Image: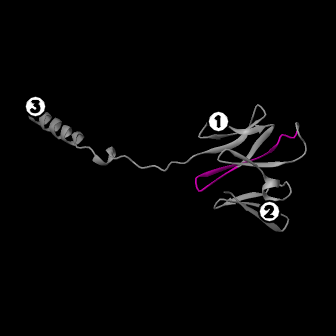
Amino acid sequence: MKIQILAFLTAFLFCISCNNEDSTLIEKKASYDVYLGGVDEFKACYWKNGQQTFVQEGENLMGTKIIVDNNDMYLFGTNIDKIDPKPAWYFWKNGIKHNVSEYLNASNDPNFSIGNGIVHKRTNTNIVTGKMA
């Protein structure tokens, strides 16, 4: 009986000591940044991965849209209605503020897109573009 128990314990210890080596491999996981535009205390700002950043000259403005293109971050923003009801659109490229109507010589309208460093603004049937330096 003791020999059978000893044989069973030996076999059992042998089985549990042989573990799967694949479990120690480190899995590669994709990493993504999460952006959110908004307003805090009447200042335009954005959050990247939970870290809040206020943009320069963002007083009485709110961030409404973020586009990341070729490692450049664009934050689009507009007036806060209760403070200034006249619509005006702005964008910040990597923290530098631009007035959309001056930059594109177009009316204020929230239809924007970015492609390869070029700001596109759709107005009725035309597409107005401008290139950043």
| Residue at (57% x, 46% y) in the render | 33
Look at the image and give the residue range highlighted in magenta: 66-81
Q: Which mark is residue 2?
A: 3
Amino acid at dot 1: Gln
27, above or below 125, in the image: above
Residue 98 on image: x %, y %? 75, 49
Amino acid at dot 2: Arg
> Which residue is outermost to the bottom?
125
Mark closest to the chain's N terminus, 1 or 3: 3
Residue at mark 2:
122
Real-space Cα distance between discs 2 and 3?
A: 86 Å
What is the secondary structure assignment of the residue under circle 1? strand
What is the secondary structure assignment of the residue under circle 3? helix
Real-space Cα distance between discs 2 and 1?
A: 30 Å
Residue at mark 1:
52
Residue 74 on image: x %, y %? 68, 50
> Which residue is outermost to the right?
85
| Residue at (78% x, 66% y) in the render | 127
The answer to which of 86 and 49 lies nearer the viewer is 86
Q: Is residue 41 left or right of residue 20?
A: right
105, above or below 125, in the image: above
Residue 58 on image: x %, y %? 75, 39
Number of numbered markers: 3
Amino acid at dot 3: Lys
Residue 115 on image: x %, y %? 66, 61
| Residue at (9% x, 35% y) in the render | 3
The answer to which of 6 and 92 lies nearer the viewer is 92
Mark closest to the chain's N terminus, 2 or 3: 3
Mark closest to the chain's N terminus, 2 or 1: 1
